Amino acid sequence: MTHERTKSSRYMPWAKTQAHARFNLATSGVANMTLRELSVELDAIEINGDSFYG
């Protein structure tokens, strides 16, 4: 049985919710929405493409 270790940081949750910087680089600024709210069909979503990151 293998045990995977998950790394976490106390800083990131704080930075995403409590930091009040003029330019907050810890969050994307994109609203949390479901696909249903966006009226998007799954076939129309491209999650892979030609890029260095996949």
Image: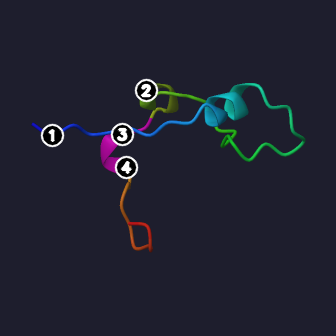
Q: Where residue 28 appears, x then y in whole percent?
A: 66, 43
Q: Tag 3, which secondary structure?
A: loop
- First in sequence, mark 1 or 3: give its number: 1
Q: Amino acid at mark 3?
A: Glu
Q: Residue at x 33, y 39 (%)?
A: 5
Give the magenta part as a residue range.
40-45
- Asked whether 3 or 38 is in front, the reply is 3
Which kind of residue does numbered mark 1 sit on?
A: Thr
| Residue 2 falls left or right of residue 50 | left
Q: Which quadrant would residue 12 be assigned to in this image?
A: top right
Q: CA distance from mark 3 to mark 4?
A: 5 Å
| Quadrant position of the N terminus in the picture | top left
Q: Position of residue 2 (x, y in %)?
A: 15, 40
- Image position of 38 with respect to 23: above or below: above
State yes or no: residue 29 in magenta.
Answer: no
30, 46: nearer the viewer: 30
Kind of residue at badge 2: Arg
Mark 4: give few (<14), some (14-19) or many (20+) Cα within 10 Å: few
- Assess whether mark 3 and mark 1 are in contact (beta carbons under 8 angstroms): no
Q: Kindly identify the amino acid type of the residue bearing the numbered disc 4.
A: Ala
Cα separation between marks 2 and 4: 13 Å
Q: Secondary structure at mark 1?
A: loop
Q: Which residue is mark 3?
A: 41
Identify residue for label 1.
Answer: 2
| Residue behind mark 2 | 36
- Total labels drawn: 4
**CA neighbours of label 1 inside 10 A, class few (<14), some (14 to 19), many (20+):** few
Query: Alpha-carbon neighbours of circle 2 within 10 Å: few (<14), some, or many (≥20)?
Result: few
Q: Which residue is mark 4?
A: 44
> In terms of sequence position, does the residue under pointer 4 or pointer 1 come before the other?
1
Q: Is residue 54 above or below residue 16?
A: below
